[in-house]
Image: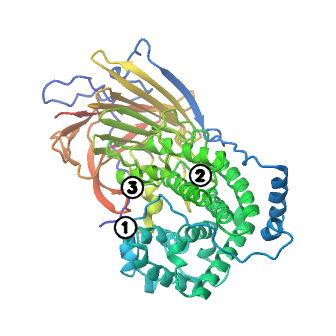
Amino acid sequence: MNAQVPGLRSRERAAENTVPRQMAIPLDMPGEELLVEDERREIETPELPPALEISDAPDAPDTHETIAADRALVLTDFDPPAISAAERFVRMAYRLGVPGSTLASPFRKPARTRLLATVESTLQGERAAGMALRAGHFFVHGVKSPIAQVDFGPTAKATPPLERVVHGFTWLRDLDACAPRPQCTAVAERILASWLKANPRPGKGPAWKIEHAGLRLLGWLVHAPLILSAQDKGFRQDMLATIEETARWLDRNVTRAPERMEEIAGWCAITAAGLLLSDGKPRRLFGEAGLARALGELVGDDGGVLSRSPVAQMQAIELLVELSACYRAAKRGIPDAIGAVLSLLVPPLLALTHGDGGLGSWQGGAAVPADRLAALIEASGVRARPLREPRGWGYQRLSAKPAVLQVDASPPPLGRHARTGCASTLAFEFSHGDHRLIVNCGGAALAGGQVPIRIEQGLRATAAHSTLVLGDANSTAVLLNGKLGGGVGEVEIDLRTVDLGNGSARRLEATHDGYGQRFGLLHKRILILRDDGSELRGEDVLVPSGRKGKRGKVPFAIRFHLGRHVEATLSDNKRGASLLLPDGSLWQFVTGASEIEIEESMWVDGNGRPHPVQQLVIQGLASRGGGNFSWLLKRMG
């Protein structure tokens, strides 16, 4: 398929005439005529259309806050588990380099490395990926890589997703899930032998990234029966020595991780090794303290990871679920601080679910299917409802069954937290029942599989999200390696319930300053979701950021990326579009703009497969003095 990133052309096509003032769309539209007449005249100052000036309900809850980029993500301070004075001394001595065997048993010969327990994890791998391994292939995001052709060495060049699977040994979970264990051990030992031959000792290269080493050690400990069931006792003892050597390497290097998620993987592995290896108590005490501190720097006070990425949120849950299994195997209770973080991580993830139970596409993530998400939540053992009051997490979720509206109402993550940071402020997704009408392209975090690496940066751009773009520019600068630059500094939010006369609705108003410095304009988005879920009306308003608006015009485009299988057809006058869903239901999109267009777009599913979709685009020239653009999405049958 064509890998062109939707909406990222050399220049948006601008209208030759001045932008007409968009007339308000009436709440009730009789008959078949859904389009309204406009009044063409120059815009000097922005003015909300009458239909959006709705009085509040008598007792409507009203929240208004400003979220700034430097304080929106509040670090949570977690104390290490409470221990005795003697244990504190042991932990300090281990941190200073005293061997664990000396601290555990100072008057006897160090014990031979051995595993103290067998771990039974509640996490389930992907059976299809496991079957591919048995057939001789790594299967990552829909791409098969023959095992025989994979270079396991330090100079190998591979895509980031394949590197993570190969050197992190996350494939062990998939292999364990595809068939009875005795049928899988030969495959695991064969791949392991090839990897050990290419990486005989700690060194450089992808195998010795902190995250990969942590995932690998944790995988070896959790799935030890797959790799330690050989009849060759010499191989088993050599493998145990490699496990101990990797743990010692992580002890020394874990704090050098460039990103917090990498450090979390390392600390989880260190703690697991302390639980499951002989003479491991000093390492366990060391690991628990380091993990508690790192988790406090990873997670905000509402439970959302500071990268605001659902992919990272899921990875953090997976790591803590595996570690919890190690605690159970060692017959120890998980420390309260670590268990509390696991409980905190689930509600924010549930807040990004649509009516079909799958995740929305935010901060590089993709539409993880409902069954995979449900399996993860089940494995966590956490029973919770979706997060209702996001602070650092920043995603607003308005539900009017069977409709779900998700809005990115916070500044993007800070550069030091971002992995695949996206300039998606004020973008939204909208679903009705099992069908997604408006989506974001998503999938930047999955680039390197079926999503080409070369378009990863484009998928992080503002144009790849359902929001307004000014002057072909991102609302926040998109840099290389998943980082973000300057742009949105704060977001003002106002959320309330409003009375429509013939029903009620939830009204969200949010404003960001990402275009203020470059164009002198603030972007305000107003979204009103009717309580029966049958209607979503919106308005995008450009407000001068200074006291006096600047002269001139700037190109704008408001993009609405459509869900997969949604068929769009323009009306005869090109000022509306019919949206036909797979179940036969019909929705109508209308706007007061002079016309809308249908363009090609792309949507990445939860398995990393890109699909061609369509997008509705309202575009033209906006006055630097301000402007407003109304639109309505309404179910017709």
Q: Amino acid at mark 3?
A: Arg
Question: Who's the residue at 47% across and 55% down the image?
Answer: 364
Classify residue 214 as left or right of residue 126. Answer: right
Amino acid type at mark 2? Gly
> Residue under circle 3?
372
Is 494 rendered above or below residue 205?
above
Residue found at the very far left of the displayed protein:
31
Q: Residue at x 55, y 59 (%)?
A: 322
**Marks 3 and 2 close (CB-CB < 8 Å):** no
- Specify the amino acid type for callout 1: Arg
Q: Secondary structure at mark 2?
A: loop
Q: Which residue is mark 2?
A: 485
Indicate the quadrant containing the N terminus: top left, top right, bottom left or bottom right: bottom left
Query: Which residue corresponds to the image point at 42% horizontal and 11% vertical from the top-left?
Result: 58
Which picture quadrant has residue 127?
Answer: bottom left
Residue 369, position in %: x, y? 36, 53
Closer-to-camera residue (610/426): 610
Dots 2, 1 in contact, CB < 8 A: no
From the viewer's perspective, is 540 left or right of 343?
left
Q: Is residue 446 above or below residue 434?
A: below
Nearer-N-terminus badge (2/1)? 1
